[in-house]
Image (cartoon, rainbow, N blue to C red):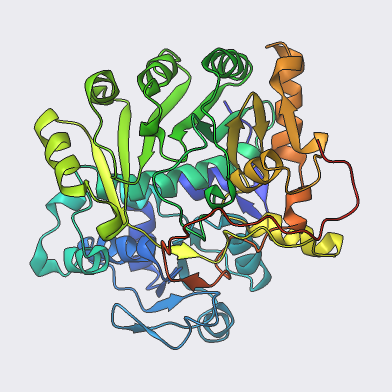
Amino acid sequence: MAQRSEWAGYDLDFLISYNIDDVVEKIRAEELLVAIFGAGITGRYALAALKSRGIHVSYVCDSDEQKQKKNFCGYEITSLSNLAKEKPNACVFICSTYLGPMLSALESFGFRNVFSCIPLFESTDFSRLEVNKGGLPIIKDFLKQDSGTAGIDRDLTLYKLELMQFVDKHRPDVLKLPVIDVVITEACTLRCKDCSNLMQYYARTKQVDLAILFESIEKIMKSVDRVHELRVMGGEPLINKEMYKVINKLLKYDNAGKIVVYTNATIVPQGQNLSCLKHKKVLFNITNYGPLSKNYDKLIGVLDNEGISYASKVVKFTDSGRILPYQNRTEKQLKDIFFNCCTNDVFTLLHGKLYHCPFSANATNLNAVPCDKSDMIELAEEKEGPQLRQKIEQFYKRKNYLTACSYCNGRDYRTPIIEPAIQTKKPLPLPGDHRPGDFN
């Protein structure tokens, strides 16, 4: 049996695996008021799921001061501090993937009846929610789009994935990585000036060396217990005519979860790049850029005709796609940026190196930040097995911030939302104000 994990005064095992029927009974028997913490898409799913069980939500809370006092599905969003003053014994459902900061906030205000939404969602068949129960419109009005054959499932999977990785990270003797972005090309068919993966800075692009990629993947997969999700990325991965070889390779690993291919719907896959998507473990994830996704309708038609599972979301950008000149931040500020970042555990495999996040990977690859060897694992220099496992574990569980955090604008709930997908005709220049250091 796995050792029980405690963090910030909460039993993490219970937080994600409680019995939902027992919690519902407790709410009714003790007449507890119910609140959700997080006014976003997960909060909408929680409202629908709780309503389908006859549970009334009394409060919606959010840490983002810009959201507070605004309307959310008929509720006025309040702060956690206000809820603590009025109803300190409220039952709170966490509706965000920022589990660490949320648990810290909940603990500071003394909330004890705290639950994730994982068991709640797993016991709810969203496809069968009736419109007259008021649940489904809460979700569909938000999506405002056809989210694909696996749209809602994808949202719920990402929520569960983020929370599970947080719990796994605090378990001893367990090494389960949440996500690895497997980059197969630096090239993209779009050049969004605010791309969070920094494609707008690439003046010259290249495809990955498959031999190096496959050797790197082999070493990682033989050294860890599991990787919950492997994401085939670019740039635009369909530019790589041998994408299918990568997917077929990834499908061979029993300790790998979903294989997710990210695309901008400018290219319709053909031949083996299409047939490899039919596997049940593969999900085709479409970012819909509107008119820029010029082959969107054609792509959807092909996927539907071939029975390929896909999810689609309208693009949303935050101001996290800039390489800043060196920011002279304190250690406390760097730890805060890293701790709150939504991609601080989205590992990136790029040209045989394993990085902690996509910003760090691409900024280092572009030679835009100092090359800090402690911020990557050079897989060519490693052998699979106990030593590499230990190195990955230390890299995953002990890192507090990265060199790249001194050049990043942050990527969390506090980062402003900006106009998406503004195109630039030429690659953006790299910032010239670097911290003194060695560049490779």
Name the spot of residue 324 as percent of width and height, x first: 70, 62
Please indicate, yes or no, whether residue 401 appears anywhere in the rendered image.
Answer: no
User: Which quarter of the figure has residue 282?
Assistant: top left
Q: Is residue 256 above or below residue 205?
A: above
User: Which quarter of the figure has residue 374?
Assistant: top right
User: Which quarter of the figure has residue 328?
Assistant: bottom right
Residue furthest toward the front?
426
Name the spot of residue 346 as percent of width and height, x first: 57, 42
Name the spot of residue 370 as percent of width and height, x first: 81, 45
Q: Between residues 345 and 30, which one lies in front from this camera angle?
A: 345
Q: In the image, what residue occupies the spot 39% across and 29% down?
A: 259
Q: Is residue 285 left or right of residue 408?
A: left
Q: In the image, what residue occupies the spot 35% across and 20% down?
A: 244
Q: Between residues 21 and 141, which one lies in front from this camera angle?
A: 141
Q: Is residue 376 left or right of residue 226?
A: right
Name the spot of residue 174 as percent of width and height, x first: 63, 27
Please indicate, yes or no, whether residue 358 appears anywhere in the rendered image.
Answer: yes
Q: Is residue 411 left or right of residue 237?
A: right
Q: Is residue 68 left or right of residue 241?
A: right
Q: In the image, what residue occupies the spot 68% across and 70% down?
A: 108
Residue furthest toward the right?
436
Q: In the image, what residue occupies the spot 15% across and 57% down?
A: 129
Q: Is residue 173 above or below residue 437?
A: above
Where does the C terminus fall, quadrant-wise? top right
Q: How many marks?
A: 0
Where does the N terminus fall, quadrant-wise? top right
